[in-house]
Amino acid sequence: MTGTWAHMTAAELGREIDAGRIHPVELTEAFLHEIDTHPLAARIYARATPARARGEAMAAAARAKAGLRRGPLDGVPLSWKDNFDTAGVATEAGSALLKGRVPERDAAVLATVTLNGLVCLGKTHMSELAFSGLGLNPVTATPPCLNDDRAVPGGSSSGAAASVAFGLAPAAIGSDTGGSVRIPAAWNDLVGLKTALGSLPTEGVVPLCERFDTIGPLAHSV
């Protein structure tokens, strides 16, 4: 990957885009290339969304050129846990029970993030239906752990954590009901945040327990 982009924080990448030193399309292409070629990528990503990512990156580049960036992360790519609905793209929540499930619209939080200019790289593997803190999923794939790629990475946002830890996304969005962002973040030397209940809309997120489900980021640093 060009330079050290894989190890830069999302905020650093956003600042470099703002300064004109990183082109959003080149940044997205670099991460898509890593997803295509990394030997562990199939254990991390359930599916990439290259057409969507390229379109969003081109729009971000046009805004940056015109001085109309929508925020400090406009043009920065993210990965999304596979329980967030993506319009026209399978969202299976790590379960054979939902195989082939294709939503008609994005989850509310994904729609908001897209409106703010961030780029969707694809959907990451997870514990089946988000019901495990280990990250083990024999049904689909068990993502690797940064500290031992033969070990489980923590769950249930297992692929979300691995995508950041292995340089396949600058940051990731996961969900946390009883530790599902915090555990894989800790096990992969990342930062994860369980947001306050109700602070972000869970509409369009395959639920584990709606009374306790929350949405949170995983990233290299606070």
Image (tube, rainbow, N blue to C red):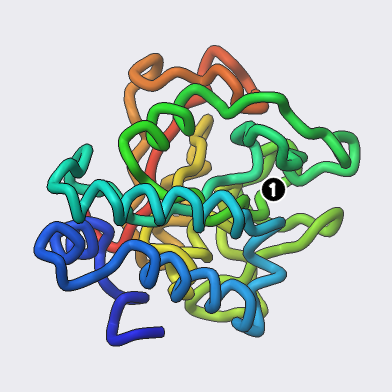
Percent x, y of residue 134: 63, 54
Question: In the image, what residue occupies the spot 34% across and 30% down?
Answer: 195
Name the residue rendered at 76%, 55% in the picture. 137
For label 1, count other residues whose C-alpha is less than 10 Å away and answer few (under 14), some (14-19) or many (20+).
many
Residue appearing at x 65%, y 33% in the figure? 87
Q: Is residue 80 left or right of residue 208?
A: left
Residue drawn at point x = 21 percent, y = 52 percent? 64
Q: Which residue is mark 1?
A: 127
Query: Residue 209, how many percent across, how many down?
Result: 62, 20
Residue 11 position (above or below residue 89)? below
Residue 37 coordinates in the image, percent (x, y) = 62, 83
Tell me if 70 is positioned left or right of 206 in this view: left
How far across and down, in percent of the image, does residue 136 sit?
71, 57
The amino acid type of the residue labelled 1 equals Ser
SS at mark 1 in the image: loop
Decide which of 68, 150 is in the foreground and name it. 68
